[in-house]
Amino acid sequence: MRITIPKRRFAVALETGRYWQGVGRSEYRLAKRLPWSDPSRLSQMRYGLNTGQMLSCYTTKPNIKDQSPNVSDEASKSENIRLSPTKGLEQPISMPFHRLDEGTWLHNRPETDVYKLLIDAYRLRVEDTYVFRAELMEDSIYAGCKNGRRGFRKFLRKAATIPGLLPPWWTKEKSAACEKFGMDSSQWHSLRYAVEKSDIMEHYGDRLFPMQLRMLADAVYGIHPCGTDGTVMRKLMMVAERADAKNNTVDGSEGSKASFMGFVRRVLWFR
């Protein structure tokens, strides 16, 4: 059975994603400038917001063929085991989207790393709630509070109700320690300051890391602020991870790009 993918819909989504990357937060908030004013196209815009960044990141990965031929096969295989993020944590992990799907993304990590991830997932959620819904999250600094401690405490309590989401060692004492960690204004992961998607990408050195934090927050709240379900996107990223781990095909070659982009088009159509 042959499936025809409407090019217009895919182009709209991709164009929106590119537009979103090029607009500064302050400019967007003040001018409310969008590529289209028709409210009926908001669903298509959401496709772009959720997929445009991932598409551009995936297809611009450096080509391994451009590396020195003197590099051994073993070294190449080692380098192809992608760890996420590239910086910012004591212990990065492999296959992060698989672990998100399994609900174990926070497991088997150093305690401090878990604190950082929870804090940043909450901070990005506050930002996304403002950007996508034009709402100020209660008890957040966006709502006028001096810090986000009370809002973060609610976030942790809600996360604790999701079976298996938090590490097995998590207790009320650890929750209090996490709050205390977030109140330290001398470190980057502070509940006293706001954070944007670009800040997350720069700090962690991973253009897909905001997506991971958003999926963690989605697991806590049950849905993304824009009203979309991230399941399809997570499955899509799992396909990319499996291809990377099994065949080392995520190398920027034309063949891998073509097959992956074909899959993306099918997902955009059926989602």
Image (cartoon, helix red, strand yellow):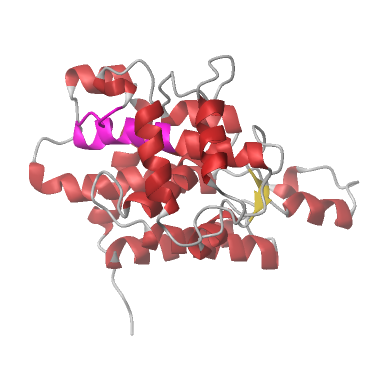
Residue occupying image coordinates x 36% and y 64%: 267
Q: Which quadrant of the view contains residue 156?
A: top left
Residue range (magenta):
122-139
Q: Is residue 260 visible?
A: no
Rendered-image quadrant of the C terminus: bottom left
x and y, in percent, of residue 109 in the image: 66, 48
Task: Spot the residue most to the front.
Answer: 173
Q: Is residue 66 visible?
A: yes
Q: Count the marks: how many?
A: 0
x and y, in percent, of residue 210 in the image: 47, 39
**Vertically, is 199 above or below 39?**
above
Residue occupying image coordinates x 40% and y 34%: 152
x and y, in percent, of residue 240 in the image: 55, 60
Residue occupying image coordinates x 41% and y 60%: 264
Tell me, yes or no, whether the highlighted magenta stretch contains residue 127: yes
Q: Is residue 71 left or right of residue 117?
A: right
**Vertically, is 247 above or below 230?**
below
Q: Nearer the viewer, residue 70 or 143?
A: 143
Q: Nearer the viewer, residue 23 or 105?
A: 105
Rendered-image quadrant of the N terminus: bottom left
Give the main secondary structure of the magenta stretch.
helix
x and y, in percent, of residue 131 in the image: 26, 31
Residue occupying image coordinates x 43% and y 18%: 192
Q: Is residue 194 left or right of residue 136?
A: right
Q: Is residue 204 left or right of residue 139?
A: right
Tell me, yes or no, whether the highlighted magenta stretch contains residue 123: yes
